Image (cartoon, rainbow, N blue to C red):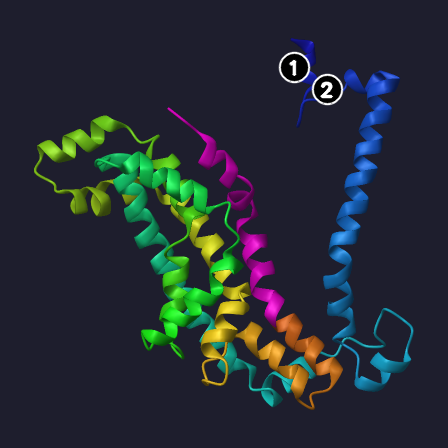
Amino acid sequence: MSRLQDKENGIITRSDLRRPGVRILYYALFTVCLLITLISIAPPVWIMLSSFKDIKEFTLSPSILPKEFDFSKFVRTWNDLKFYKFYINSLYSVAGSVICAIVFNGLLAFALSIIKPKGSKLVYALVLGSLMVPATTSIVPLFININKLGLSGTFYPLWFSIGANAFYVVLYKQYFDTLPKSIIEAARIDGCNNLQIFSRIVMPLSKPITMVVAMYAVNCAWSDFLLPYLVLNNSGLETVMVRLFQFRNGKTADVDIIRAIVFAIIPPILLFTAFQKQITQSSTHSGIKG
């Protein structure tokens, strides 16, 4: 009992740390984790600090820290590059992607978990099998079909690609499997059809996993480059990531490009900072049974 009372966070108690072997292992793991953290945050920190420099200081000064932290440089770069337009395009892409990710993947998972028609196990096996196929292997036929359907230069292919994500289907199905069957049966007795059960019963009870899927969809849609580049390039609807790639052929100063990169990474950082608890617990939600 005393060992359990000493435990605060994790599986190692204070009494465990009194043992030399456990203490050495603990500090070794702590050092490794600290090094990994420093290596991970070094690139974004360097970008953030370099973005405060002017072009002369950026190219000639060996110092990592800027001479001054002048936020007016960001305002000037934002206006000169007209970056607000690409933010709006990315927001359109993100909004449609989140809606499609929730509705389409949720409907398929609902059918596999609740309705369970004939062949549902085979369909679920195919969904799981598709996770082992790299997405880039299908990009060529996908792009050809997009052009044949006349969807090039629109956001629809981006939305539908997020709406057909096997990983989101698995997350939803495993969460739907944990819902009480008595509630579903009670809704059927009250005369609800499958669509009403999905919209009025299942989805309101699935807000935790829906939030997780929405956050994943936001990050995926915001950070995606290849498909938006193939579909939206030179259409006037370029997203932030496509615009960053287009800078390679322009006359934009390097330090302005770095500030544009800062604009691009701010939303994912804010998203993770605000919802890191839900993101890190997503594996727990997806693994709970019964």
Q: Residues within 10 Å of mark 1 (few under 14, many from 20)?
A: few
Judge by depth and name the residue closer to the eye, 248 or 12. 248
Q: Amino acid at mark 2?
A: Thr
Residue 132 horizontal/vertical position (percent): 51, 45
| Residue ID at (66%, 86%) | 249
Q: Along the horizontal axis of the image, is 124 left or right of 5?
A: left
Rendered residue at 52%/81% (across/down): 84
- Residue holding disc 1: 4
Please name the amino acid that badge 1 sits on. Answer: Leu
Q: Is residue 118 above or below residue 71?
A: above
- The x and y percentages for residue 154 are 38, 76
Q: Secondary structure at mark 2?
A: loop
Above or below for 262 versus 214 = below
The image quarter in which residue 70 lies: bottom right
Q: Give residue 55's position: percent from left, percent from top.
A: 80, 85
* Contact flag, marks 2 and 1 (Cβ < 8 Å): yes
Query: Which residue is painted at 74% across and 56% down in the image?
Result: 41
| Main secondary structure along the magenta-highlighted residues | helix
From the viewer's perspective, is residue 102 above or below residue 34?
A: below
